[in-house]
Amino acid sequence: MNKDAFVSLCGHFRVRVWVIDRKHIGVEQKMAIFLETIAYLVRNRIMKHKYQHSRATISRCFHKVLRGMLYLSKEMIVPPNFQEPGEICIHKQLREGPFKRAIGAIDGTLISKQVPKSNQILFKARRKGDCFQNVMGACNFDMNFIYVQAGWEGIAHDSNILI
């Protein structure tokens, strides 16, 4: 995440009062603790030494930002209105063909992931020794995501994710 995106995210959380500044720890530091913890799977004990706060404070900061992220997800991910005709209804060939009742498209991709050694076997790719997770996304014909599922092991087949 670049600096401008980080500052914008912190400002949004501050304006919405999802996370507030305290005497000894600001919104930016709380957000940094949260993002570093989820990005690098860092434990509270390590974050305690890095940021010089108690483990309870680190845990509280993480959970406050996590709660704010849940609110943000409700703002950002809005279910589509299937009552409005999509772009596909405009084109006669697509409207009457195999896409007659289609509301979007689904595709998946592999994303690199850092995994603890005990779980690496599940996430190993077939050709390389890297670890991946499958991410499936569905989008409507306006190219807006209407559904995203992440977390499947790197060797999971697409049909398993759809079930």
Image (cartoon, helix red, strand yellow):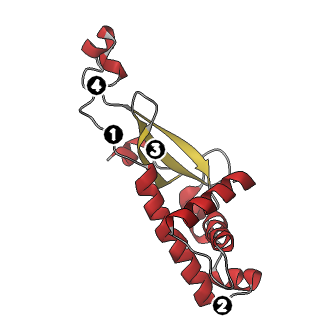
Single out the mark in the foreground, 1 or 3: 1
| Residue carrying label 1 | 80
Amino acid on which disc 4 is placed: Pro
Single out the mark in the foreground, 3 or 2: 2
* Alpha carbon distance from label 4 to label 1: 11 Å
Q: Which mark is residue 136?
A: 3
> How far across and how far down the image is residue 15, in percent?
55, 63
- Counting other residues with Cα less than 10 Å from the Cα at mark 2, is it few (<14), some (14-19), or many (20 or more)? some
Badge 4 or badge 3: first in the primary sequence: 4
Q: Residue 85 carries which label?
A: 4
Amino acid on which disc 2 is placed: Ser
Single out the mark in the foreground, 4 or 3: 4
In the picture provided, is 150 more to the left or to the right than 55? left
Amino acid on which disc 1 is placed: Pro
**Where is 44 relative to 2, above or below?**
below
SS under mark 4: loop
* Alpha carbon distance from label 4 to label 2: 54 Å
- Counting other residues with Cα less than 10 Å from the Cα at mark 3, is it few (<14), some (14-19), or many (20 or more)? some
The answer to which of 63 and 37 lies nearer the viewer is 63
The answer to which of 147 and 111 lies nearer the viewer is 147
